[in-house]
Image: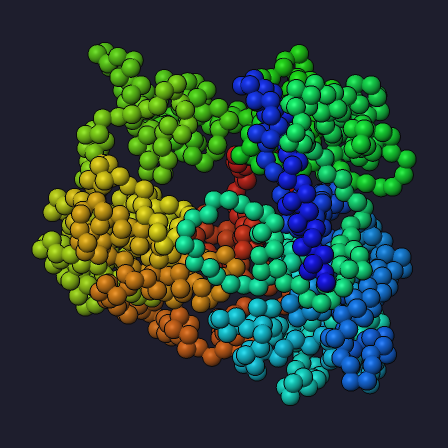
């Protein structure tokens, strides 16, 4: 029945509203100016508006409104999920003989709603967690049918929870004592035990392709609750021997889902409670609860490209509606709630607000109507002109004091009810609309579009310039100071490189102004008595362009001069090739071929033979860290370059590339696009200088290849085949990949181990074309063979693992843990020992370091070390930019 109801509503938007059209106000003016007066020829159809509850636009609108609450009241403190229990007494009492709860979706919907209201009373009336500033909740129905509710709760400032002790007062992650609280013990066993999964049940629904639990169970034993760093806390889970039997498996505290004992005992259902005040990126929590409805997953292979976008069809496609959801909607129960309510404020440029009209309307009548010219924003300006109190408010604060009357398009004073305002979002790519939003979030009481651009007695021509004058956007002053200081002691070539770096990484607001200010300083080495100013400018721009190209940028992107910059192709080719011939060959690298071990010597001779014979070949040098891969690369580069041949050195990372003479990152050297798929190719023209350089290259080395996605190598393969007109792998070039698959595989956001493996070079069609050469002798740890062997075992996956799928580190490699502060001091003492003595031997200091996976740990350790260093502290200021804190 509900499917028919929803379909009829969607049919209304598709059929009954098809005569209603919308267009921006200025668009109607433009239409009249070209003689178009028929409204049916103007505008776009309204397809599926946010007024359709549960649609994609509605869910995104609610997400943005929820983020406005975060902006106003702070990050959420508690994340709570309540799931319906089909065995609730209230449901069972209403079932007939032999009747099952799944056949009574009406009971499930009504009883769950009653329980939900009771839970809201506990949270917001009895305030069992403390006084609440704001909350949102969303009802979700999954394919299995049972509804559940997600709550995000923001507590008042005095009730915030920050300490492990306060966490323990709200959340438990342990099995209750059966003797002391039998009811709670049974309830935890029935509802809050995860799995089992992993080695106890590899086929559980939570298991991912890499044989790990997507919810990371079992957790580890933790003697005391600890605060998480940008994650949920690690709740107390004592190894006290207490277990319960679930699905014939004995489970201990590591399998308990966090919960609040009081709520769990009262509601007798799965009721997960988490402390989320320690999570920084709270937007992902809100995106999770506003993700929308379940769908059936399937794939279609289209026979042709379809250009039309039908939002209604997109919403209906594979829509899954379970019976409890259907009954919930038929009863008219709300799907989500937000306190306080948030009012979305329209945002548009002058004469760019949307106007609705019928297809039979005359555009002249639409245009001359005063009612049509009004919008929420224009009337905000009008109210400011006549109401002194209104001028004290920001646009986003306006709904707290005024009510928008849509029927009459007027703001009237608000008499009751707390409301939060939220200006609809705008992307920086939208230009002036984005900068108008920044101004509205900071300027109180503007009277018009022109007045909001006025700063003092100056009216800026654009909203961007007005935002800059107000100090809301980054200025180029710090960049000018940087260039000014560098011009005092840097040679012009270095100054040009700095200028190119600023263009790429510092995003100056006015690149042309910066160019004009320092053009003279950057050109002094080209100034001669016979050189014209035009010749000098061309040489400077060519030098800057060369640096920008090495960073993957085009000089014309920055509009330094009024017209596009172009250079003679022959000169560009000569510069590219000469730069490679100019790479210095260190003496030690020339001598390296005489110090190779037997495995390195075999690899060296195999590769060099192919180079000298100019035979197509592709190699992969496989070896754990410390086996001398870089030493081999340097020997090969030096030998090939010493014979006046071109050898290109690249690596997946900048650090690895910097170790190789003449090294560049692979993305920079081969112009590999950042957004890759299986059809991607490198952005190299067949007639370009880079293409000629690649055709001349006798050897290409790519270090740390396992870090890059296979699509990078495949893009290189296609590009080399194209520029060489050869169907051989990599166009017949001699190429050497190298690295260690035991280390870092390609980074796949939220990816599983299997997805990372699938993205690696070893899963590419190119892998079978590579000749594999293995290095195994560890040259770096020859005097600590036990440690070397242990590292190999870790890399090969042969070390024993615990039930949590973790590796146990040998005790002799660990600093005994006492507490966070003292143990960190012990670690620093063990690594750096007497820091004061290093002032006499700095090389000894540079051979010591502490590695950590998180930046906040780096900052903490560096702060401690700086305090211990002898001497006076000198501060260097970083490049900062103003961030619009109201941006969502």
Residue 631 rendering spot, x and y as whole percentages:
25, 57
Q: Residue at x 43, y 58 (%)?
A: 301
User: 173 above or below 380?
Assistant: below
Residue reaching furthest left?
Answer: 613
Residues 453 and 112: in front is 112
Residue 69 rendering spot, x and y as whole percentages:
74, 45
- Quadrant for the C terminus, please: top right
Residues 781 and 414: in front is 414
Q: Residue at x 63, y 15 (%)?
A: 459
Residues 635 and 322: in front is 322
Residue reaching furthest front?
Answer: 360
What colour scheme does the image use? rainbow
User: 697 above or below 575?
Assistant: below
Instruction: Using the rendered image of the protein, determine whether residue 102 is visible from the camera's viewpoint.
Output: yes
Q: Residue at x 37, y 28 (%)?
A: 556
Q: Residue at x 70, y 51 (%)?
A: 9
Residues 16 and 340: in front is 16
Q: State left or right for residue 884 relative to residue 723.
A: right
Q: State left or right for residue 449 relative to residue 391.
A: left
User: 256 above or below 536?
Assistant: below
Question: Residue 626 appears in which quarter of the rendering?
Answer: bottom left
Q: State left or right for residue 811 relative to residue 549.
A: right
- Give the tally of numbered discs: 0
């Amino acid at each position: 029945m509900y499917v028919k109801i929803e379909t009829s509503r969607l049919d209304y938007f598709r059929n009954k509203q098809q005569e209603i059209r919308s267009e921006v106000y200025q668009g109607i003016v433009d239409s009249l100016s070209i003689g178009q007066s028929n409204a049916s020829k103007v505008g776009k159809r309204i397809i599926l508006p946010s007024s359709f509850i549960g649609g994609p636009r509605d869910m995104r609108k609610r997400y943005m409104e929820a983020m406005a609450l975060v902006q106003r009241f702070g990050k959420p403190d508690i994340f709570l999920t309540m799931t319906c229990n089909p065995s609730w007494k209230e449901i069972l009492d209403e079932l007939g003989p032999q009747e099952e709860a799944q056949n009574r979706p009406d009971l499930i919907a009504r009883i769950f709603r009653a329980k939900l209201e009771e839970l809201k009373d506990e949270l917001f009336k009895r305030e069992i967690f403390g006084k609440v500033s704001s909350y949102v909740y969303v009802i979700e129905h999954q394919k299995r049918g049972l509804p559940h509710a997600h709550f995000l709760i923001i507590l008042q400032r005095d009730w915030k929870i920050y300490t492990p002790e306060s966490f323990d007062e709200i959340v438990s992650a342990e099995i209750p004592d059966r003797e002391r609280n039998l009811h709670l013990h049974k309830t935890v066993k029935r509802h809050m035990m995860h799995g089992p999964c992993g080695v106890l049940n590899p086929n559980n629904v939570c298991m991912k392709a890499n044989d790990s639990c997507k919810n990371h169970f079992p957790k580890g034993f933790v003697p005391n609750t600890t605060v998480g760093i940008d994650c949920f806390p690690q709740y107390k889970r004592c190894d006290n021997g207490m277990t319960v039997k679930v699905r014939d498996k004995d489970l201990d505290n590591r399998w308990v889902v966090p919960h609040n004992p009081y709520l769990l005992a009262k509601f007798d259902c799965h009721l997960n409670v988490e402390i989320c005040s320690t999570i920084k990126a709270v937007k992902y929590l809100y995106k999770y609860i506003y993700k929308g409805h379940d769908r059936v997953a399937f794939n279609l292979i289209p026979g042709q490209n379809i250009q039309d976008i039908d939002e209604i069809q997109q919403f209906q496609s594979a829509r899954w509606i379970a019976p409890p959801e259907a009954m919930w909607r038929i009863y008219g129960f709300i799907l989500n709630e937000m306190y306080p309510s948030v009012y979305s404020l329209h945002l548009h440029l002058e004469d760019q607000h949307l106007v609705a009209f019928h297809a039979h309307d005359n555009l002249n009548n639409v245009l001359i109507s005063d009612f049509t010219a009004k919008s929420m924003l224009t009337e905000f300006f009008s109210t400011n002109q006549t109401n002194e109190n209104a001028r004290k408010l920001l646009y986003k604060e306006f709904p707290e004091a005024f009510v928008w009357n849509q029927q009459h398009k007027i703001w009237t004073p608000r008499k009751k009810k707390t409301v939060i305002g939220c200006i609809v979002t705008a992307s920086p790519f939208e230009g002036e609309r984005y900068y108008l939003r920044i101004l509205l979030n900071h300027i109180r009481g503007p009277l018009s579009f022109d007045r909001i651009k006025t700063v003092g007695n100056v009216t800026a021509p654009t909203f961007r310039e007005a935002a800059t004058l107000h100090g809301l956007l980054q200025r180029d002053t710090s960049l000018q100071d940087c260039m000014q200081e560098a011009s005092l002691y840097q040679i012009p070539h270095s100054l040009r490189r700095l200028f190119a770096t600023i263009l790429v990484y510092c995003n100056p607001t006015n690149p042309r102004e910066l160019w004009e200010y320092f053009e003279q300083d950057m050109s002094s080495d080209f100034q001669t008595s016979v050189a014209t100013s035009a010749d000098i400018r061309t040489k400077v721009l060519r030098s800057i362009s060369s640096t920008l190209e090495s960073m993957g940028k085009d000089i014309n992107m920055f509009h330094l001069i009024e017209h596009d910059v172009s250079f003679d192709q022959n000169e560009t080719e000569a510069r590219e090739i000469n730069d490679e011939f100019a790479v210095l060959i260190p003496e030690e690298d020339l001598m390296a071929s005489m110090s190779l071990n037997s495995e390195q010597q075999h690899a060296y001779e195999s590769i060099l033979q192919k180079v000298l014979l100019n035979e197509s070949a592709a190699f992969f040098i496989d070896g754990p860290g410390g086996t001398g891969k870089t030493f081999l690369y340097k020997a090969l580069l030096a030998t090939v370059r010493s014979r006046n041949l071109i050898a290109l050195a690249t690596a997946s990372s900048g650090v690895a590339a910097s170790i190789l003479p003449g090294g560049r990152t692979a993305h920079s050297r081969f112009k590999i696009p950042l957004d890759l798929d299986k059809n991607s190719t490198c952005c190299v023209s067949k007639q370009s200088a880079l293409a000629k350089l690649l055709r001349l290259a006798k050897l290409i080395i790519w270090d740390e290849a396992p870090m890059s996605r296979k699509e990078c190598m495949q893009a290189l393969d296609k590009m080399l085949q194209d520029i060489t007109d050869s169907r051989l792998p990599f166009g017949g070039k001699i190429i050497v990949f190298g690295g260690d698959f035991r280390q870092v595989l390609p980074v796949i956001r939220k990816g599983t181990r299997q997805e990372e493996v699938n993205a690696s070079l070893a899963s590419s069609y190119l892998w079978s074309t590579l000749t594999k050469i293995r290095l195994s002798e560890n040259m770096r740890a020859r005097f600590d063979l036990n440690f070397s062997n242990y590292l190999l075992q870790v890399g090969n996956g042969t070390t024993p693992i615990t039930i949590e799928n973790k590796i146990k580190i040998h005790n002799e490699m660990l600093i005994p843990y006492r507490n966070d502060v003292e143990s960190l001091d012990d670690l620093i003492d063990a690594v750096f020992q007497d820091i004061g003595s290093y002032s006499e031997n700095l090389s000894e200091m540079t051979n010591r370091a502490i590695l950590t996976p998180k930046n906040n740990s780096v900052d903490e350790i560096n702060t401690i070390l700086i305090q211990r260093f002898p001497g006076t502290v000198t501060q260097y200021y970083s490049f900062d930019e103003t961030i619009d804190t109201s941006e969502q």
